[in-house]
Image (cartoon, coloured by chain):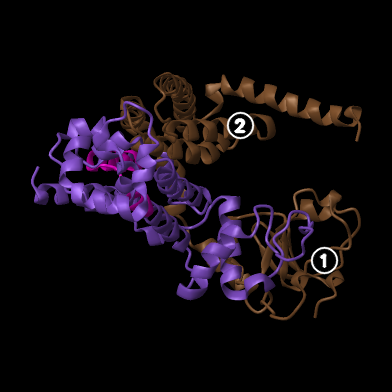
Chain colours: A brown, B purple
């Protein structure tokens, strides 16, 4: 592998870093809870890094042993932030989902670390969270409501459609126990245990013939495949038709 | 501080650490939506996928159908599970195989994971009661915890992992000898007096005396030999008489 071979990859990574840096300064693109978390982890990293450096310097001057809590926390957080900026994108709550575990780890170590500064860091984090309790409550209520208050009819409808058609068969090849779907409604929890759920988002890119025994496809997706499929309709649902794939070679 | 007060404070701090987040989540769901946790359904794509993978593993192990994107399977051929790997379905699915798998069980296991991790933190971190209380407050007010716990995402397991790892790190990165002493409630000389018999025995048994002789000049003589003993014998130390503020910032 020559350096020139790596150039396109390096350009991609650099473009990703630039994108992420730009996104960092676009708070309007994010939910308030995400912005809060971003401010918290950058502030924590900055102050903890500085404090860690001062503690290490003092320990060296006094020839006392260096306690490792803060350095471990700062290094862990720094590594994951760098990796994130290089290889991930700051969309879809990515920072909140991934970095929060590292911030929590660091803050807990602050609770155990000797000295005043780490404790003050933990106290500051708690204070900022308490001050933003209203933001959390609003975010929690709006984003979790549909997970707890919902219409059960969609599940019953799918259960009825699958009944007697889609059944897990132990001992059969995996593809014979797979349902390929173009839509992903939450009602899919009604699909029986043992039946794998595969997704097709770009039908024109999927290799044919399809191998999944069962298909759940809407009309536009069905039309996008590169060649006609050999199917037998089993049931009709609001978000597509359930088919048996005759090319799957399953019984 | 009396022994009873110390025990009460320690128990309260432990309770907040271990049960604080589950209690908060259950309360929020009840208060905001007027339903129980059992009303939960996976909603987002990833949630539905994770939940169903666990269901399949709990009933069929690795012999279920494929979870793929565009029918592209993973090269190993060992697992039918998708882009996020088999770890989550295997872990939660093993419990599901034993206890059954309902729609809301993923939330229950999330909360159990957080509680268990917090219990390990309490056991291994060995921090003073005020600091334990501080860590409990941190857990309860760390909004990403209650935000992701009532979902079918894997974030709660990651959070539990972060809490879990805190304990062993504290064990492996103990504070300086004088800090360890103070964390457990006494200054070095005081502790040395209280435990002089034990320390002498321990020095002989563990060879700590040899270690102590290697300390740099000027090190407080009363602290010698305690560095290892203190870590090994934290639980023998009696409740402290220092004020909460002193302990918090020690």
Label 1: chain? A
| Residue that appears at 64% across and 58% down | A238
Reply above or below: A244 against B196: below
Disc number placed over residue A70 in the picture, else none = none
Percent x, y of residue A14: 74, 24
Question: Residue A211 bears which disc, if any?
Answer: 1
User: With respect to residue B157, does B77 lie above or below?
Assistant: below
Q: For this rendering, which residue is in front, B220 or B15?
A: B220
Numbered label tally: 2
Q: Which secondary structure lies at badge 2?
A: loop
Q: Residue A240 in the image: x percent, y percent?
A: 70, 59
Query: On the image, numbered disc 2 is attached to which residue?
Result: A90
Q: Quadrant of the rendered structure where residue A141 is?
A: top left
**Residue lying at 85% horizontally and 75% vertically, measured from the top left:** A249
Is B134 part of what is drawn in magenta?
yes
Q: Quick check: is A107 in the magenta stretch?
A: no
Towards the viewer: A153 or B166: B166
Instruction: Using the numbered discs, state the Cα–Cα distance from disc 1 to disc 2 in whole angstroms.
Output: 35 Å
Q: Which of A50 and B76 is in front in this view?
A: A50
Q: Mark 2 falls within which chain? A: A
Of the 4 image quadrants, the one containing the N terminus of chain B is top left
Point out the image quarter for the C terminus of chain B: top left
Question: Looking at the picture, how far across and down is residue B71, in whole percent?
Answer: 79, 58
Magenta region, main secondary structure: helix
Question: What span is in magenta?
Answer: B120-140
Numbered disc 1: secondary structure: loop
Regarding residue B23, the answer to whether it shows in the image is: no
């Amino acid at each position: 592998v020559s350096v020139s071979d790596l150039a396109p990859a390096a350009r991609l990574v650099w473009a990703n870093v630039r994108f992420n840096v730009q996104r960092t300064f676009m708070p309007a693109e994010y939910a308030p809870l995400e912005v809060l978390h971003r401010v918290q982890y950058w502030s924590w990293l900055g102050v903890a890094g500085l404090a860690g450096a001062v503690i290490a310097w003092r320990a060296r001057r006094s020839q006392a042993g260096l306690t490792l809590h803060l350095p471990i926390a700062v290094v862990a957080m720094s590594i994951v932030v760098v990796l994130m900026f290089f290889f991930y994108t700051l969309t879809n709550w990515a920072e909140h989902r991934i970095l929060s575990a590292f911030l929590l780890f660091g803050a807990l170590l602050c609770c155990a670390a000797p000295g005043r500064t780490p404790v003050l860091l933990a106290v500051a984090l708690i204070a900022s969270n308490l001050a933003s309790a209203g933001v959390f409550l609003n975010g929690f209520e709006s984003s979790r409501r549909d997970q707890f208050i919902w219409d059960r009819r969609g599940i019953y409808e799918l259960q009825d459609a699958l009944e007697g058609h889609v059944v897990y068969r132990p001992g059969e090849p995996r593809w014979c126990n797979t349902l390929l779907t173009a839509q992903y409604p939450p009602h899919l929890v009604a699909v029986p245990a043992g039946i794998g759920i595969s997704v097709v988002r770009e039908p024109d890119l999927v290799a044919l013939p399809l191998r999944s025994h069962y298909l759940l496809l809407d009309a536009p997706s069905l039309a996008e495949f590169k060649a006609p499929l050999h199917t037998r309709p089993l049931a009709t649902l609001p978000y597509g038709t359930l088919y048996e794939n005759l090319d799957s070679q399953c019984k | 501080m009396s022994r009873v007060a110390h025990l009460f404070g320690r128990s309260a701090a432990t309770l907040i650490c271990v049960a604080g987040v589950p209690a908060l989540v259950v309360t929020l769901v009840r208060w905001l939506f007027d339903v129980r946790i059992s009303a939960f359904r996976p909603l987002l794509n990833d949630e539905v996928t994770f939940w169903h993978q666990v269901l399949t593993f709990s009933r069929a192990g690795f012999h279920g159908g494929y979870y793929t994107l565009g029918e592209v399977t993973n090269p190993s051929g060992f697992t039918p599970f998708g882009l996020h790997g088999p770890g989550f379905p295997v872990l939660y699915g093993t419990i599901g195989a034993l206890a059954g798998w309902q729609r809301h069980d993923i939330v229950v296991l999330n909360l159990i994971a957080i509680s268990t991790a917090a219990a390990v933190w309490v056991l291994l971190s060995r921090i003073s009661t005020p600091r334990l209380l501080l860590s409990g407050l941190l857990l309860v007010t760390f909004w990403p915890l209650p935000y992701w716990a009532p979902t079918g995402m894997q974030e709660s397991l990651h959070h539990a992992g972060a809490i879990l790892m805190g304990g062993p790190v504290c064990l492996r990165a103990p504070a300086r000898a004088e800090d360890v002493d103070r964390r457990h409630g006494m200054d070095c000389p005081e502790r040395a007096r209280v435990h002089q018999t034990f320390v002498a025995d321990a020095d002989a048994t563990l060879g700590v005396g040899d270690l102590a002789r290697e300390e740099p000049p000027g090190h407080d003589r009363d602290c010698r030999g305690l560095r290892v003993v203190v870590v090994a014998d934290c639980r023998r130390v009696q409740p402290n008489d220092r004020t909460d503020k002193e302990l918090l910032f020690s």
